[in-house]
Image (cartoon, grey):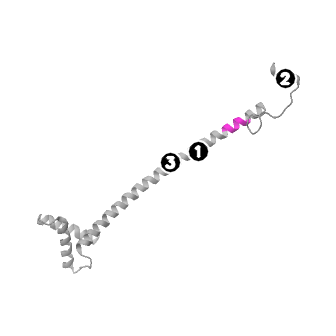
Amino acid sequence: MTQDEKEIAKAKEDIAEKGADSQTEKDRVDESVAAQERAKGEEDSQNAKDRVDESEGAKKADEKRAEEEKEGAGLDAKIDALIGRMDKLIATFEARAEAKDDKMARAAEKYGLAPSGAGETPKKSYTDEDVKKLLG
């Protein structure tokens, strides 16, 4: 806890002990911090109200930064998980493409298709006897 935060806490305790009046609690905190500083001989060029405001602003900024870091860590984990799933999906597609390529190569070999797999047969001349065999 910083010195300013300690003074603010002490000021809030003092206010709670003395009870409410026409001043706002924030005004009373500012005055109490200033009085504590005067008593200690630690007056600053910046007035107590401004330092209280700055301290509270710094505290809120720290809380916001911590929350953003926490959210960022969660987001990083989600991104890592998504990348992992994408890698698995890509590997699956690559395996399927490879299997399809193997199947096409076997079919091309078996049925005499061109190695390109475009469905073209190699140029071959048939005799009358070959035609009769093919037609049955």
Q: Nearer the viewer, residue 69 or 121?
A: 121
**Quick check: is 103 in the magenta stretch?**
yes
**Percent of width and height locating residue 107:** 73, 33
Total numbered circles: 3
Q: Quadrant of the C terminus?
A: top right
**Looking at the image, is mark 3 or mark 2 nearer the viewer?**
2
**Quick check: is 21 in the magenta stretch?**
no
> Label 1: which residue?
90
**Percent of width and height locating residue 118:** 73, 37
> Label 2: which residue?
131
**What is the distance, in whole Å, between disc 2 and disc 1 at their CAs?**
47 Å
Do the CB atoms of the residues marked 3 and 1 lie less than 8 Å apart?
A: no
**What is the distance, in whole Å, between disc 3 and disc 2 at their CAs?**
58 Å
Instruction: Please give left or right for residue 127 compared with residue 41 in the image.
Output: right
Q: Amino acid at mark 3?
A: Leu
When asked about the image quadrant of residue 5, the answer is: bottom left
Q: Quadrant of the N terminus?
A: bottom left
Which is more N-terminal, label 2 or label 3? 3
- Which residue is pictured at 30% across the width and 66% down the height? 57
For mark 1, does the 10 Å Cα neighbourhood hold few (<14), some (14 to 19), or many (20 or more) residues?
Answer: few
| Residue 37 sits above or below residue 15 on the image | below
- Which residue is pictured at 20% across the width and 66% down the height? 26
Which is more N-terminal, label 1 or label 2? 1
> Label 3: which residue?
82
- Which residue is pictured at 88% across the width and 22% down the height? 129
| Residue 101 sits above or below residue 83 on the image | above
